[in-house]
Amino acid sequence: MKNEGYGPAGKDRRIMRKLAELDKEGKIGDLVCDFGSSFAPVSYPLVFHKRERAVLGIDIGLDVPSIDWYKTVYSRVLFVQGDVEELNHIMRKPEVLDLFSRAGKSPPIRFTTIICSDLLNYVDYKNVIRISRANLARGGRIVISNMAEAGESELFEPKGVKRNSQLLAFLERCFAFEIEDHIPAFRDVADS
């Protein structure tokens, strides 16, 4: 893989490429939840690859009029404003239940893929990983893209990720997760 830098644009290209690769291998499934989706969700390409796939995007700061475009183009996509640590509450909202219904899903809902995109610095990452795992379908996967120490530091959660090596150790120790692809950042190499 050529060096694309560690900035947001390079990171987004890498995660989108990884998601496309997993999708080609049939590893994404038909119900995706994108945490930290913002106005430019990395799950965007997944929307068009499989007609029966449904995507729920959640972002605490979501306030983007263009999000309505997704709903007019693709009925199985919904982006909502909310705190991912309140996922169980969000999943009971009428518009979210309607999305699940359009996708032919009924409770209990379990996602085939959960994407955590650039939010683990801003939340209690251990809690978000636990919530993700609890809402994951058997054989599902959690895809994490996180730039430790990057972003609006004044908004960082004290229990948020400080270094990605900390996140990797937590995943391996507490959940026996298989780390499929880790692209270390230059500042993370010393942590490994």
Image (spheres, rainbow, N blue to C red):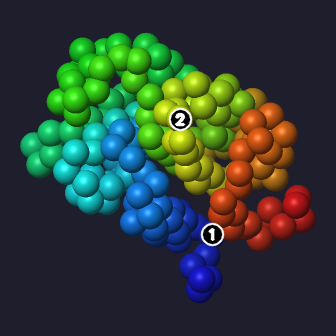
The amino acid beneath tag 1 is Tyr
65 left or right of 10? left
Judging depth in this view, the residue of 185 and 95 nearest the camera is: 95
Judging depth in this view, the residue of 56 and 10 nearest the camera is: 56
The amino acid beneath tag 2 is Arg
* Disc 1 element: loop
Q: Residue at x 32, y 55 (%)?
A: 46
Q: Quadrant of residue 94?
A: top left
Residue 21 in view: yes
* Disc 2 element: strand
Q: Residues within 10 Å of mark 2 (few under 14, many from 20)?
A: few
Measured as percent of width and height from the top left, residue 59 is found at 43, 35
Q: Which residue is mark 2?
A: 138
Q: Residue at x 41, y 58 (%)?
A: 26
Q: Quadrant of residue 172?
A: top right
Please determine whether, in this image, residue 33 is positioned above or below residue 28. Answer: above
Q: Quadrant of residue 112?
A: top left
Q: Quadrant of the N terminus?
A: bottom right
Judging depth in this view, the residue of 164 and 63 nearest the camera is: 164
Measured as percent of width and height from the top left, residue 120 is found at 63, 40
